[in-house]
Amino acid sequence: MTAEEAHFLEKKSIIVAGAGIADYSLGMEQDGGVQILENLSLLHRVIEKATPGTDSMPFKIWDKNWSELIAVPAKPYGDLPMARLRIPRASLRNIMIEEAENLRISILWESQCLGVKLLDDGRLSITVSSPKKSEHLIDCDLLIAADGAHSKIRASLRPDDELLYAGATQIGGLAVFPQGIPNPLADSWGIMASGYGNSCFVSPFEDKTVIWAFSKAEEMPAQATGGDGRALLDEALSTAFVIPARDKKPFNHENVLPGVVFIGDSNHAVSPFAGNGANMALADGWDLAGFLSTSDSIGNAVAAYDKVSVPRAQKTLNSSHWRISIANLKGIAFAIFRCIIQAGGLLKWIAGR
């Protein structure tokens, strides 16, 4: 493309479906979210809203007695001011929305994209639903589907591409410590592996609050049994969640309607065990924008995007399944795993690392 040529997206309309970042909090890693936020000149704003102290907290694995089995330190990459941070998702969402509004991007609130069709002229016709207006059509040239794990656009175009149960269920919530967060959670985060087939993820959240998630490997997701005793749990359930771990494999866009691009969870939903969903969503958006700006067509941009996004998502999917199996080891298998990671820690200590 020469300097005199107009960009292929000039005077074209682009719709991004989805703007929600749900759940309690998310972690940003140096090789994903943190780097991209720095590239967007938003890192300083995110740091202001991040949970204090989480930028230097090591990730740890403890046994059932909270004895440390392994610690992975947080080391900043390059010129970045931190290796990782944790921030309430609502806070990050607000920052991103404010930035979009500053760029005069039009946001249509409380609306859903229900379906999409290819028009004869190559443009797309989007079926939109909103409380203030019955279903109506909006035409565009590029639709970026970012409407989450339960994407209505994916359901419309890829009805058989559904979430699959990943083999574990998490039950969790928030724990408040009025006198302050106790050790070892005051200065670290990670997983307590019991060795009996279950585990608990814990991390400081805000001030005197810890987010926790108990997990147990099961062949099928647990079902609520009801009964009179459930009334006693109402107060606890008001700050708790039950999440059967579900995810799906990433896909490329070879057989997707031209002009439609799926990013983030709408393409490659991951379970809480991945711990990398928001990082991947940011990376997807950044990479796609880069390829769109430097390519000569939507097709070439999407093909280049697929080459980096699909392998990245598959790697995260594989690692999340590994975490599920490791966190819920029991018996001899857990004993062997414990010996292996302790031996690894000893070798690092001997090597001075």
Image (cartoon, rainbow, N blue to C red):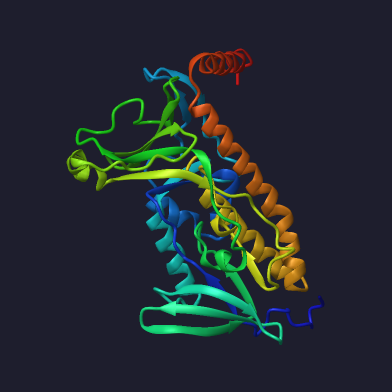
Q: Residue 66 occupies which quadrant of the picture?
A: top left
Q: Is residue 52 above or below residue 109?
A: above
Q: Residue 240 occupies which quadrant of the picture?
A: top left
The residue sitting at the right extreme is: 2
Q: Residue at x 56, y 44 (%)?
A: 30
Q: Is residue 89 above or below residue 262?
A: above
Q: Is residue 228 left or right of residue 152?
A: left
Query: Is any atom of residue 22 visible in this view?
Result: yes
Q: Is residue 318 left or right of residue 93?
A: right
Residue 180 point in image, percent of width and height = 24, 33
Residue 329 point in image, percent of width and height = 50, 23
Q: Residue 130 occupies which quadrant of the picture?
A: bottom left
Residue 221 point in image, percent of width and height = 44, 41
Query: Is any atom of residue 53 visible in this view?
Result: no
Q: Residue at x 52, y 70 (%)?
A: 17
The one nearer the camera, 89 or 162, is: 162
Q: Is residue 158 above or below residue 51?
A: below
Residue 136 point in image, percent of width and height = 48, 85
- The number of numbered badges drawn on the structure is 0
> Where the C terminus falls, by quadrant?
top right
Q: Residue at x 60, y 43 (%)?
A: 317
Q: Is residue 296 above or below residue 44?
A: below
> Where the N terminus falls, by quadrant?
bottom right
The one nearer the camera, 192 or 186, is: 192
